[in-house]
Amino acid sequence: MVVVEKTPSAFGPLFDSHSHINSEEFDADREQVVSRMRQAGLIGAMVIACDLGEEAKLFEVIDAHPDFLCGAWALHPEYEDRREPTVEEIAAVCADPRIAAVGETGLDYYWCKGDLSWQKERFVRHIEAARMLKKPLIVHAREAEADALEILIDNRAHECGFVLHCYGGDADTARRAVDAGGLVSFTGVVTFKNAGALRDVVKALPLEAIMIETDCPYMAPVPYRGKRCEPALVGEVAKTIAAVKGIEPELVAKTTTQTALRFFHLPACCRTI
Ligand SMILES: [Zn+2]
């Protein structure tokens, strides 16, 4: 595994709205990863568990930094062969105060083919649980953005709030998501040389509708491509968004962090900005 040795220069305040630092890729050096986050100007991060039985480890990771980390849990749309949790089971896990959102849930047409009614039904159950709890949804929609948005609208997801995470769709669908009360979140992919179309989506959206994330350990931004991604690199996403919009990275950092704190209903103690 190739890891980042040097922390990028700090500016902030930054918030990584989607990370998987609970995954085994970080078992050996999670404390150093969190130290680098603080050094890089992050004031917090969302940590997401994607499978049945991963809740205990998620809580263990968050409990080590309760002032800094919050969590989300859902059964990921890529996992077809799992027992389906009921709405009540999802709600029982996500009612925990350490859980700030239900997710990631949604649709994946890239990895999953054929009759995907199971995936849609699972998505609807997660939306129902989120509305019950009044906690926002973190939505994974891969090559399925328009269908996911339709399901979100049909099931009144605006009542709890939703974000289309790791957005890779077109500007029209992104704008419709924002009009429907949602947010759009961008990863390090937006920094890639060949991601001109995605930078056009950034251009088309108001800064207030955008969050930033790493989705680590995947998709390390330029100039860290090929290394293990970690939340300390989320500033690179902010820098690219700033360049696209012709504004200062500090403004992108501050605005996206305020948006994240509001969206995830994070406690007043975190609102130091
Ligand atoms: Zn993810």
Image (cartoon, rainbow, N blue to C red):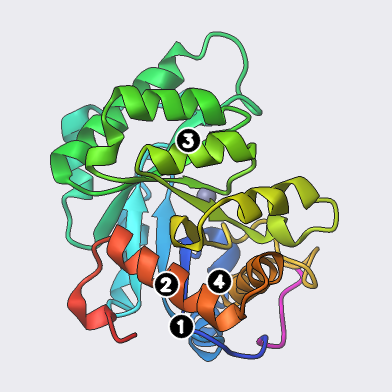
Q: Which mark is residue 231?
A: 4
Residue 156: quarter of image = top left
The magenta-colored residue range is: 1-7
Q: Is residue 148 above or below residue 64?
A: above
In the rendered structure, the answer to whether residue 204 lies left or right of residue 193 reads left
| Magenta highlight on residue 2 | yes
Amino acid, disc 4? Pro
Q: Which residue is mark 1?
A: 13
Q: Is residue 192 above or below residue 11?
A: above
Q: Is residue 217 above or below residue 2?
A: above
Q: CA distance from mark 2 to mark 1?
A: 7 Å
- Label 3 or label 2, whichever lies nearer to me, is 3
Q: Are marks 2 and 1 in contact (CB under 8 Å)?
A: yes
> CB of residue at label 1: within 8 Å of ligand 1?
no
Kind of element beneath mark 4? helix
Q: CA distance from mark 4 to mark 3?
A: 29 Å
Q: Which residue is mark 3?
A: 176
- Label 4 or label 1, whichever lies nearer to me, is 1
